[in-house]
Amino acid sequence: MGRLAGKIAIVTGGAQGQGAAIARAFVAEGAQVVIADIAEESGEKLAAELGDAARFQRHDVSDEASWTSVVEFTAATFGDVNVLVNNAGILRFGEIHTMDLDEFDLVVRINQRGTFLGMRAVVPTMRRNKQGSIVNASSVEGLAGMGSLAAYTGTKFAIRGMTKAAALELGSRGIRVNSVHPGMIDTGMTREHGGDAAMEYGASKVPMRRVGTPEDIAPLYVYLASDESGYVTGAEIAVDGGVTATHAFGG
């Protein structure tokens, strides 16, 4: 308890899945959290569950004005934001020669543009206060490619790169920027692409022989948001059950 005392966080995609686990873990460690998501019913329910330390704000990460609103809402409700978790993202499968351009653009808009806008929205406040932590959700697909995921993989590589560029720009201002790279995690987003069969197949490919849970991921976010990670910036940290410990021949 108390590892995040004094921290005021925005968690995007915070209404469900990994985002909800992060919000719960943050509140349990003493942070005040704005759960930012388009899923209003789930977001309001989670905020009510977490009590006075959490509020829900409807938020579209791809919209610049929505970012201005959520940062202002956070400041008015709890105070200046000093932790941003860019967790919101979508997953779409499609081979390069068949994927619809509108769907490709949607993945880029939510995953990559949303992360960029989030960093840009909170940096002025963090610069003024000379401190802050930004944690960007990438993926193991931001470390290596996967067939039929060109759009998703491209955005996750971009998030990894933007994280490093931002860490270089902001380090002297007391702002740390890191990326988290989960493997296959059992969430609604992954289950919609294959259900139990996909989970079982994924587990068979993991050295630990299980897929991860949101609760496996959340403690790393707590660490990166806390002062314990005060000398960690520009890092890329995999939480994947060992998937990226190996290599593949062929494809």
Image (cartoon, rainbow, N blue to C red):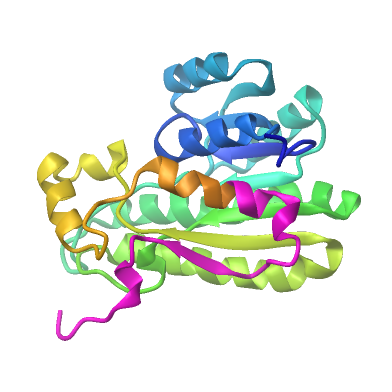
State the extent of the magenta-drawn residues as a range: 222-251
**Above or below 4: residue 78:** above
Q: Quadrant of the C terminus?
A: bottom left
Q: Residue at x 70, y 45 (%)?
A: 83
Any part of residue 83 in sight: yes
Q: Closest to the observer: 67 or 163?
A: 163
Q: Is residue 142 above or below residue 66?
A: below
Viewer-proximal residue, 189 or 18?
18
- Does the magenta-highlighted stretch encompass residue 72? no
Location of residue 44 in the rendering, given as x and y in whole percent from the top left corner: 51, 17
Q: Is residue 200 left or right of residue 129?
A: left
Position of residue 157 relative to residue 5, above or below, is below
Q: Residue furthest left?
A: 197
- Name the quadrant containing residue 240: bottom left
**Residue 195 location (% of width, % of height):** 15, 40
Q: Residue at x 61, y 36 (%)?
A: 26
Query: Does the magenta segment cover residue 238?
Result: yes
Residue shown at the point (12%, 55%) measured from the top left: 201
Name the residue rendered at 50%, 44% in the picture.
Answer: 218
Quarter of the image with the N terminus in it: top right
Return the residue nearer the eye: 228 or 69: 228
Q: Residue 31: horizontal and vertical position, in percent?
A: 70, 33
Q: Of residues 90 and 207, which is closer to you in this image?
A: 207
| Residue 119 visible in the current orientation | no
- Measured as percent of width and height from the top left, residue 212 is found at 33, 49
- Number of labels in the image equals 0
In this picture, residue 40 sits left or right of residue 103: right
Farthest residue, direction bottom: 249
